[in-house]
Amino acid sequence: MNTLGEETKMRLKLATIALATIVAAAPAMADLVVPNLSYRTGPYGANGTQYADGFNDYFTLLNERDGGIGGEKVQTPECETAYNTEKGVECYEATKGNGALVYNPLSTGITYQLIPKVSADKIVLYTPGYGRTSAKNGKVFEWVFNAPANYWDGASVAVKYLLDQNGGDLKGKKIALVYHNSAYGKEPIRTLQDLAQKHGFTLSELPIDPPGQEQKSQWLQIRRDKPDYVIMWGWGVMNQTAIQEAANIRFPMENFIGVWWSGSEVDVLPVGASANGYKSLTFNGVGTDYPVYDDMKKFVIEPGKASQGGQFVGSALYSRGMYAAVVIAEAIKKAQELAGTPAINATQLRDGFEALDITPDRLKEIGLPDFGPEIKMSCDNHGGSGMARLQQWDANAKKWSLITEFTEPDQDVLNPLIQEDSEAYAKEAGITPRC
Amino acid sequence: MFYREAGDFKTSYRDDGQTFPIRLDRWGYYALLAVAFLVVPFVIDSYWANAVLVPFLIYAIAAIGLNILTGYAGQVSLGTGGFMAVGAYAVYKLMTAFPGVPIFVHILLAGAITALVGMLFGLPSLRIKGFYLAVATLAAQFFLIWLFNKVPWFYNNSASGQINAPERTFFGWAVTGPATTASAKYLTCLVFAVGVAWVARNLTRGTLGRKWMAIRDMDIAAEIIGVNPLSAKLSAFAVSSFFVGIAGALLFSVYLGAAEASEAFGINKSFLVLFMIIIGGLGSIFGSFAGAAFLVLLPVLLKNLLVAQLGWPTDLAAHIELMIVGALIIFFLIVEPHGLARLWRLTKEKLRLWPFPH
């Protein structure tokens, strides 16, 4: 008879083998530990790889050039999540015991899962440009930071740009939102609905089921409805499919705006010349025309220390990964100053994030002039200014060019929404606001 | 040498019909239950709970549920992910609407709600069989996920459509939410897994289980000997969905803490659970556990081996891991098409004769 007895035996056997592996595997950790929960496989792997490389390379640069931050080396143990929440949990549990200071999982789904966990474990969660928007409210989300910009900022900056294009009036215009049918894609809906009311445009919502290779019917609808503009919240294979479909129905590319996660080279290159003129939001510069790349070349790329060979250096997502690393490194530095010791813990890092002030001058010192907006955070503001800008794809030169300056989002619309959503969370999770 | 009945005398029918008629087996079973309940909770850490044992136990429950339907009653289902989603969203609605009620009650109620939904989607099984039924349950999978994405009531109108499990307790012990200890999570899932396995074992060797198996083996013959296909098939759908719903509720509330329908309960989940029972062994409770162990623990083990031990790049390790798991699935199915459960049974037969085989 096969029943519970044997299966438990079997389980124990497997467990013993696994235990032996893990015990032997625990690496010796002493330095500053910044786990890199990356994904280089699956439908989002093409995007995740570049981001992870930029993230790793900047810390390698600091280690090689400056001997770490404040004399402490930085380790970035990598763990593959495949953008999957269950693997994300496994990665978090596997790395948190080694003195992890901050997590940057690059997945809104995993972020939602980690928010309660990091709050209980007292570890910082830094989600630049993704994650839960209302985490901007530091009174409720003590351990979560999402500067420089969040999804609602992005939605607002995109609409502001369209207002500019139309002489400040969007009345009677039709805007379609094409979104990844997940927590990530649904985030901007509420803001866009409020903005539609305020500015008098009509919004149509077109969900695309992940991973998003199948979107013929949505674009058929766009061809029929003829919206004036299409805004996209896509990621992974969904981006290139959408841009291809837009090209197929001859939708004018300059009226097609993607969020910053829909604006990388891998999204437009497969579409070729017809992607010319496609626009996307961004909050960081692209390309290698920044002084920091001189050092990067000398200390990281030429000695062969670049993450996975350094084949994506300077791409939009590589730059964004590097930017996330820059902000984390600056926060660590700030925390070291405040704590008076180079070996900080996660609580001290939280204080560092809250006291963070990355001015344009400081960015210039780092070797990244005008790379990102000014970031100034405080106990109640965990989201910075929310400024973003637009870039446009030039299919002939195969590069992105920035077409606007950093623009402030419409905080009058966003603040009440953030207040409302974070208060709902505080009530649900039983949190008393701090600060 | 092992598992011998010699000297193990049975003096009643009850003794003869017990689940573990061989003394060594029985002792092993009690010893393992004792270890699982009395030792593991005191030594478990959060990695072992969250990455290894809790998912294993939850998937084992789901696999037992599907095994009732597919392995015992012969009704192929591809709707497991959708039914798990019903369990998850039901427990979410219940735990946010009635915060004072103990969470165990909510999980059982979520199972009951899933059982009703499962019966509803089981109705077509009275007319269609085999591949056609599989397609009908596939429709259930897509419909349910679409429903949970579409109707904001199911996720309490949250901005992103995510559901989050707030902290809920059972006699003062946190069972869900971030403050839950590793041992509380593990014990909750263990109680449900052992309970489900016990109920499933006893159902399948009683009248109901025999009816299911009669329907599975030949439905016309079963009808002629007096098995009512309506009640047999619908009861299989109900019991199966009840267990699957419990698994979904635990997956969301105890294990993940936050979920969205299409990511956590997509079609992949349906296939994963189906593979578990095919690899573990159709129509076997032990097979459900073995299959869940194979597909949940092996990837974690390989990841730790390749990345942490051998220091391979994470993407290479992830791809190799897929290949190794795939190759092992093919290997095991070629060596033993009836699954790991059958392999274990053969091993026991051999051990019995060891060291003097025929």
Image (spheres, coloured by chain):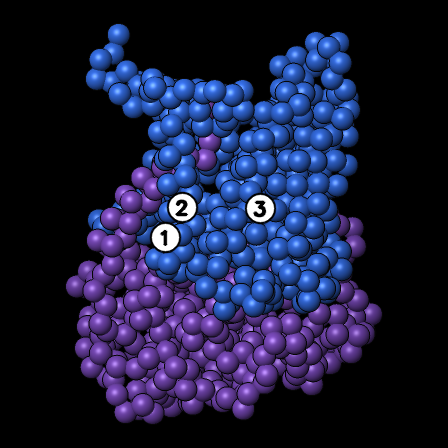
Q: Nearer the viewer, mark 3 or mark 1?
A: 1
Residue A405 visible to an observer of this rendering: no
Residue B343: image quadrant is top left
Q: Amino acid at mark 1?
A: Val
Locate residue A332, reporting x and y percent: 33, 81
Disc 3 and disc 1 on one polypeptide chain = yes
* Rendered colour, chain A: purple
Where residue A69 sits in the image (x, y, percent)? 25, 80
Location of mark 1 (residue) = B39
> At numbered mark 3, what does the secondary structure look like: helix, strand or loop?
helix
First-in-chain label (2 vs 3): 2
Q: Chain of mark 3?
A: B
Q: Residue at x 66, y 55 (%)?
A: B105
- Cα distance between the residues tagged 2 and 3: 23 Å
Query: Dots 1 and 2: beta carbons under 8 Å?
Result: yes
Q: Are discs 1 and 2 located on one and the same chain? A: yes
Distance of mark 1 from mark 2, alpha carbons? 7 Å
- CA–CA distance in space, label 3 to label 1: 24 Å
Q: Quadrant of the N terminus of chain A?
A: top left
In the figure, what tint was chain B given? blue
Residue displayed at 41% across by 20% down: B9
Q: Position of residue A205 (x, y in %)?
A: 73, 59
Number of the label disc, if any, that sits on residue B34: 2
